[in-house]
Amino acid sequence: MKKSLFSLALVLFTFFAMAQNNFSKSAIGVGVVVEDLEKSIDFYTNVIGMVKTGEFSVSKEQCTELGLTDSYQLDVTILKLEDSEEASEWKLMSLGTKAKHPKQKFMSDDTGMQYITIMVKHLQPVLDRIEKQGIKVLSGKPSELGENRFFLLVQDPDGTFIELIGPK
């Protein structure tokens, strides 16, 4: 009986260990189609503080073959919170006015990805950039969450909500 339980435990451990190790990278890359690529790059780099770490293109032929677009080329700009291999990728691409999505007033206005959360070391430098660029703070002001953590809510140029959380 003990041998059977040990064998079962070993099989379960191996199964779960393999399932958890099936990824070659621990970060997630998110592709975001934006209306105005330059405006979005400016927002994410100069307001939020991300860094541009690369770019690539996918030809319209390859996009069609891969099922990505119906014969449009994709030019992708890669942004990260820091320039490191482990950092998640925020990949911006634009099809111009081809792809339009109504700008939501609240997260509850639509389904799908509505927001991202960015944890910052200090909220004030981000708030200063937000105010300098004239970005509306939807949460009104930094709201205290407790334990010296504050919350700001803004939207990018296409309406994706950005939660910023950190000490002032």
Image (cartoon, rainbow, N blue to C red):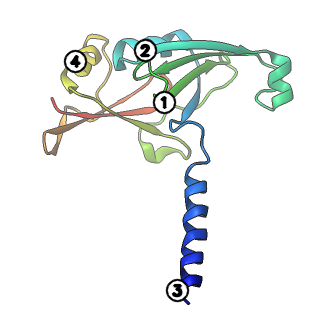
Which of the marked residues, 2 or 3, is nearer the chain's N terminus?
A: 3
Quadrant location, the N terminus: bottom right
On residue 125, which mark appears? 4
Which of the marked residues, 3 or 1, is nearer the chain's N terminus?
A: 3
Identity of the amino acid at label 1?
Ser
Residue underneath mark 2: 51
Foreground tag (4 vs 3):
3
Residue 99 spot, x, y in % from top left: 67, 25
Within 10 Å of disc 2 (Cα), the crowding (few <14, some 14-19, many 20+) is some
**Alpha carbon distance from label 4 to label 3:** 60 Å
- Residue that sits furthest to the bottom in the current view: 1
Within 10 Å of disc 4 (Cα), the crowding (few <14, some 14-19, many 20+) is some
Side (left or right) of 163 relative to 143: right
- Residue at horizontal 50 percent and vertical 25 percent from the top: 158
Quarter of the image for residue 37 reads: top right
Residue underneath mark 3: 2
Identity of the amino acid at label 4?
Pro
- Residue at horizontal 56 percent and vertical 61 percent from the top: 16
Quarter of the image for residue 95 reads: top right
- Residue at horizontal 45 percent and vertical 21 percent from the top: 84
Camera-nearest residue between 6 and 59: 6
**Alpha carbon distance from label 2 to label 3:** 55 Å
Classify mark 4: helix, strand or loop: helix
Foreground tag (2 vs 3):
3
**Alpha carbon distance from label 4 to label 1:** 22 Å
Camera-nearest residue between 164 and 39: 164
